[in-house]
Image: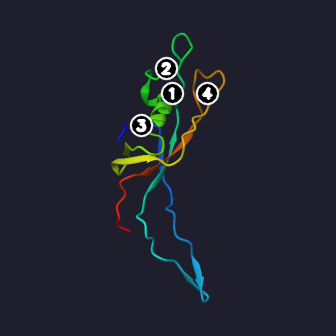
Amino acid sequence: MAGNFDYCPKSRVVTELAPDETDVMSMNGWQFSSRPRTPYRPSFKVKLSGMRWYLNSAGTALDVTTNPTINAGRLLNFYKLNRKWDTFSFPHEYLGIIICRFKDPVNIPVAIPDSGGLIEAFEVNLIQHNASWTI
């Protein structure tokens, strides 16, 4: 496990996404849906707002230490460290600490012009890694 997802703790919005369900098949005119053979794996859409890009004092490289919870460069490094295969802890609002990984690649927007590095709100998709086999 590689770290803790501690970005935008006071301004993020977490939404649980609907689970993938098996297709409904028509059998002799009857609708049929079979019980899933795989465990339910919750996935989450996390909307991050208020993040910023920071540059070092010379303006030649990303600064990943200033304001760490809203630092877009630090999030970029966190994604590069974990990508879609490694896990990390995620402090969910009502589920507590859960183990997740990135469901999709993270695309951090560029800064808004003349904003001092502020970026528009964007979404990151996570999937719970330690899902139960209970259906």
Image quarter hosting the N terminus: top left
Report how far apart the C-alphas of labels 4 and 2 lie in the structure: 14 Å
Earlier sequence position, callout 4 versus callout 2: 2
Q: Which residue is mark 3?
A: 9
Report how far apart the C-alphas of labels 2 and 3 lie in the structure: 20 Å
Q: Position of residue 3 (x, y in %)?
A: 36, 36
Residue type highlighted by circle 2: Asp
Q: Position of residue 7 (x, y in %)?
A: 44, 35
Quarter of the view holding residue 40? bottom left
Residue type highlighted by circle 1: Gly
Q: Which residue is mark 4?
A: 111
Q: Which residue is mark 1?
A: 73
Residue density around tag 1, few if under 14, some if 14–19, many if 20 or more, within 10 Å: many
SS for dot 1:
helix
Residue density around tag 4, few if under 14, some if 14–19, many if 20 or more, within 10 Å: some
Answer whether labels 2 and 1 touch (C-beta < 8 Å): yes
Image depth: mark 1 or mark 4 in front: 1
Q: What residue is shown at x 48% (from left), y 77% (from top)?
A: 34
SS for dot 2:
loop
